[in-house]
Amino acid sequence: MRPAFTAMIACLALAACVNVNDTPVSTRPAQITTQERGLIQSTIIDGMKDPASAQLRNLVAYDLSDGQGRAICGEVNGKNAFGGYVGFQPFFMRVKDGRLVSSYYGTGDPNDLDHFMARKGCGEAATGMMKISSTK
């Protein structure tokens, strides 16, 4: 293939990954509420093999600008079917008007999309600026 054609294909592929519905919002650290802890429990922990073994760490919430709700980040560890802990995995949740808008939970495989999205969402929130889908 010609280099110019290869470069054009690469640019088109990259452009296809950009969501024109993304809205930039600023973030500000905040305290996690009791209701948000309940969402972590019902969304992530209750779906684990052994919910009673769940361990949480690095919990942080972020207020999003323009009435876009809040982002909640952290890591969770739990036991697998063999009774061993799998290691802390990242999670990201966005809440608006008390309801869950989106959530991503790492699987232990850094190449997994949910793992990537959890890290990406929390990384952006920590910088004070993130992009969210304006269609949600």
Image: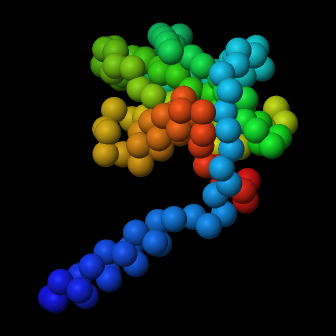
Question: Left or right: 34 with respect to 42?
Answer: right
* Depicted 4 relative to depicted 84: above or below: below
Q: Residue at x 31, y 45 (%)?
A: 111
Q: Position of residue 132 (x, y in %)?
A: 64, 49
Question: Left or right: 3 with respect to 131?
Answer: left
Q: Position of residue 58 (x, y in %)?
A: 50, 15
Q: Residue at x 60, y 33 (%)?
A: 128
Q: In front: 6, or 58?
A: 6
Question: Left or right: 84 with respect to 25?
Answer: left
Q: Is residue 112 visible?
A: yes
Q: Quadrant of residue 86?
A: top left
* Depicted 93 relative to depicted 24: above or below: above
Q: Position of residue 51 (x, y in %)?
A: 53, 17
Q: Position of residue 41 (x, y in %)?
A: 64, 21
Q: In front: 86, or 16?
A: 16
Q: Residue at x 40, y 78 (%)?
A: 12
Q: Quadrant of residue 87?
A: top left
Q: Quadrant of residue 47?
A: top right
